[in-house]
Image (spheres, rainbow, N blue to C red):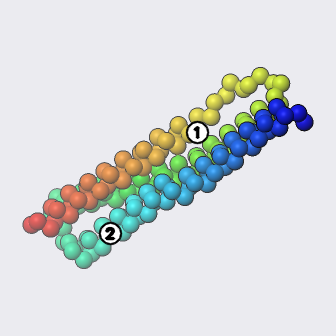
Amino acid sequence: MDEDEIKKEEVYRRRRDILIDVAREHARSFDKYILTLAAGTFGLSLLFIGQIAPHPKDGTEWLLIAAWVAFGASILSILIAILLTQEACSKQIKMLDEEFLNPDLKKAKTKNVLPAYTRILNWASMLSFIIGVIFLIKFGTSNLLS
Protein backbone atom coordinates (compact mmCIF):
# COMPACT_ATOMS: atom_id res chain seq x y z
CA MET A 1 0.00 0.00 0.00
CA ASP A 2 1.38 3.38 -0.90
CA GLU A 3 1.13 6.47 1.30
CA ASP A 4 -1.94 7.89 -0.48
CA GLU A 5 -3.83 4.64 -0.05
CA ILE A 6 -2.92 4.53 3.64
CA LYS A 7 -4.16 8.11 4.13
CA LYS A 8 -7.35 7.32 2.23
CA GLU A 9 -7.96 4.30 4.43
CA GLU A 10 -7.31 6.35 7.58
CA VAL A 11 -9.83 8.96 6.45
CA TYR A 12 -12.31 6.22 5.62
CA ARG A 13 -11.93 4.59 9.03
CA ARG A 14 -12.19 7.92 10.86
CA ARG A 15 -15.38 8.83 8.99
CA ARG A 16 -16.84 5.42 9.66
CA ASP A 17 -15.95 5.59 13.36
CA ILE A 18 -17.49 9.04 13.60
CA LEU A 19 -20.75 7.77 12.12
CA ILE A 20 -20.84 4.92 14.61
CA ASP A 21 -20.14 7.33 17.47
CA VAL A 22 -22.86 9.69 16.25
CA ALA A 23 -25.39 6.87 16.22
CA ARG A 24 -24.40 5.83 19.72
CA GLU A 25 -24.31 9.35 21.14
CA HIS A 26 -27.57 10.36 19.54
CA ALA A 27 -29.35 7.46 21.19
CA ARG A 28 -27.95 8.51 24.58
CA SER A 29 -28.43 12.25 24.68
CA PHE A 30 -31.35 14.14 23.17
CA ASP A 31 -33.58 11.09 22.97
CA LYS A 32 -32.91 10.19 26.58
CA TYR A 33 -33.72 13.68 27.79
CA ILE A 34 -36.95 14.01 25.84
CA LEU A 35 -38.12 10.56 26.90
CA THR A 36 -37.31 11.32 30.52
CA LEU A 37 -38.95 14.72 30.44
CA ALA A 38 -42.07 13.62 28.58
CA ALA A 39 -42.59 10.53 30.74
CA GLY A 40 -41.78 12.46 33.92
CA THR A 41 -44.13 15.27 33.08
CA PHE A 42 -46.84 12.77 32.18
CA GLY A 43 -46.32 11.13 35.59
CA LEU A 44 -46.35 14.52 37.29
CA SER A 45 -49.69 15.29 35.68
CA LEU A 46 -51.10 12.04 37.08
CA LEU A 47 -49.85 13.00 40.54
CA PHE A 48 -51.35 16.46 40.15
CA ILE A 49 -54.74 15.12 39.16
CA GLY A 50 -54.71 12.58 41.99
CA GLN A 51 -53.35 14.73 44.82
CA ILE A 52 -54.01 18.38 44.06
CA ALA A 53 -56.97 18.55 41.70
CA PRO A 54 -58.90 15.27 41.97
CA HIS A 55 -62.06 17.04 40.83
CA PRO A 56 -61.07 19.34 37.98
CA LYS A 57 -63.26 22.23 37.01
CA ASP A 58 -65.79 21.46 34.32
CA GLY A 59 -64.48 22.21 30.88
CA THR A 60 -60.80 21.84 31.82
CA GLU A 61 -60.42 18.09 31.38
CA TRP A 62 -59.69 18.51 27.70
CA LEU A 63 -56.55 20.49 28.61
CA LEU A 64 -55.20 17.52 30.54
CA ILE A 65 -56.12 15.09 27.77
CA ALA A 66 -54.46 17.37 25.20
CA ALA A 67 -51.32 17.45 27.36
CA TRP A 68 -51.30 13.66 27.59
CA VAL A 69 -51.75 13.31 23.83
CA ALA A 70 -48.89 15.77 23.24
CA PHE A 71 -46.59 13.92 25.65
CA GLY A 72 -47.51 10.63 23.99
CA ALA A 73 -46.74 12.13 20.57
CA SER A 74 -43.42 13.39 21.90
CA ILE A 75 -42.46 9.98 23.22
CA LEU A 76 -43.57 8.21 20.04
CA SER A 77 -41.72 10.69 17.81
CA ILE A 78 -38.47 10.28 19.69
CA LEU A 79 -38.72 6.48 19.72
CA ILE A 80 -39.18 6.48 15.95
CA ALA A 81 -36.30 8.95 15.62
CA ILE A 82 -34.04 6.59 17.57
CA LEU A 83 -34.79 3.78 15.14
CA LEU A 84 -34.35 6.04 12.13
CA THR A 85 -31.00 7.27 13.44
CA GLN A 86 -29.76 3.72 13.68
CA GLU A 87 -30.99 3.00 10.16
CA ALA A 88 -29.48 6.22 8.81
CA CYS A 89 -26.09 5.39 10.25
CA SER A 90 -26.24 1.81 8.97
CA LYS A 91 -27.14 3.06 5.51
CA GLN A 92 -24.37 5.66 5.58
CA ILE A 93 -21.85 3.04 6.68
CA LYS A 94 -22.92 0.79 3.78
CA MET A 95 -22.58 3.70 1.36
CA LEU A 96 -19.14 4.54 2.77
CA ASP A 97 -18.08 0.88 2.59
CA GLU A 98 -19.24 0.65 -1.02
CA GLU A 99 -17.37 3.83 -1.94
CA PHE A 100 -14.21 2.62 -0.22
CA LEU A 101 -14.30 -0.97 -1.44
CA ASN A 102 -15.18 -0.04 -5.03
CA PRO A 103 -13.31 3.20 -5.72
CA ASP A 104 -13.48 2.72 -9.49
CA LEU A 105 -17.28 2.69 -9.58
CA LYS A 106 -19.10 5.93 -10.12
CA LYS A 107 -20.46 7.33 -6.91
CA ALA A 108 -24.02 6.30 -6.38
CA LYS A 109 -26.55 9.04 -6.87
CA THR A 110 -28.51 7.77 -3.91
CA LYS A 111 -28.68 10.05 -0.94
CA ASN A 112 -29.29 9.09 2.64
CA VAL A 113 -32.52 10.96 3.42
CA LEU A 114 -33.07 9.28 6.78
CA PRO A 115 -31.15 11.94 8.77
CA ALA A 116 -33.58 14.56 7.45
CA TYR A 117 -36.53 12.49 8.69
CA THR A 118 -34.81 12.04 12.03
CA ARG A 119 -34.37 15.81 12.39
CA ILE A 120 -38.06 16.33 11.59
CA LEU A 121 -39.04 13.76 14.21
CA ASN A 122 -36.70 15.32 16.79
CA TRP A 123 -38.27 18.73 16.19
CA ALA A 124 -41.76 17.20 16.29
CA SER A 125 -40.91 15.56 19.59
CA MET A 126 -39.62 18.80 21.06
CA LEU A 127 -42.63 20.76 19.78
CA SER A 128 -45.06 18.13 21.10
CA PHE A 129 -43.35 18.24 24.48
CA ILE A 130 -43.61 22.05 24.63
CA ILE A 131 -47.28 21.91 23.61
CA GLY A 132 -47.91 19.31 26.31
CA VAL A 133 -46.26 21.52 28.92
CA ILE A 134 -48.37 24.50 27.82
CA PHE A 135 -51.61 22.49 28.08
CA LEU A 136 -50.54 21.07 31.45
CA ILE A 137 -49.75 24.54 32.80
CA LYS A 138 -53.09 25.83 31.54
CA PHE A 139 -54.87 22.89 33.18
CA GLY A 140 -52.96 23.39 36.42
CA THR A 141 -53.55 27.11 36.65
CA SER A 142 -57.23 26.67 35.79
CA ASN A 143 -57.67 24.24 38.66
CA LEU A 144 -55.37 25.80 41.24
CA LEU A 145 -56.54 29.39 40.92
CA SER A 146 -60.21 28.61 41.48
Q: Is residue 113 above or below residue 108?
A: below
Question: Label 1 sits on what residue type?
Answer: Leu
Do callouts 1 and 2 mark residues in contact (Cβ within 8 Å)?
no
Label 2 Cα neighbours within 10 Å, binned few <14 / some 14-19 / many ≥20:
few
Q: Residue 70 carries which label?
A: none
Q: How far apart are marks 1 and 2 (CA)?
A: 34 Å
Marks counted in the figure total 2
Residue name at image x 32 percent, y 52 percent: 130
Query: Which of the 4 image quarters holds residue 139?
Result: bottom left
Res 140 visible: yes
Residue 34 in percent (x, y) is at 43, 57
Residue name at image x 42 percent, y 44 percent: 123
Residue 36 in percent (x, y) is at 44, 63
Q: Is residue 135 above or below residue 120?
A: below
Determine the secondary structure under disc 1.
Answer: helix
Residue 109 in percent (x, y) is at 68, 24
Query: Which of the 4 image quarters holds residue 47?
Result: bottom left
Question: Label 2 sits on what residue type?
Answer: Leu
Residue name at image x 36 percent, y 53 percent: 129
For the C terminus, give its image quadrant: bottom left
Residue name at image x 26 percent, y 71 percent: 48
Q: Which of marks 1 and 2 is nearer the N terminus?
A: 2
Residue lying farthest to the right in this orientation: 1
| Residue placed under numbered mark 2 in the picture | 44
In this rendering, would 20 be left or right of 62? right
| Residue placed under numbered mark 1 in the picture | 114
Residue lying farthest to the front in this orientation: 3
For the N terminus, give its image quadrant: top right
In this rendering, would 142 be left or right of 106? left
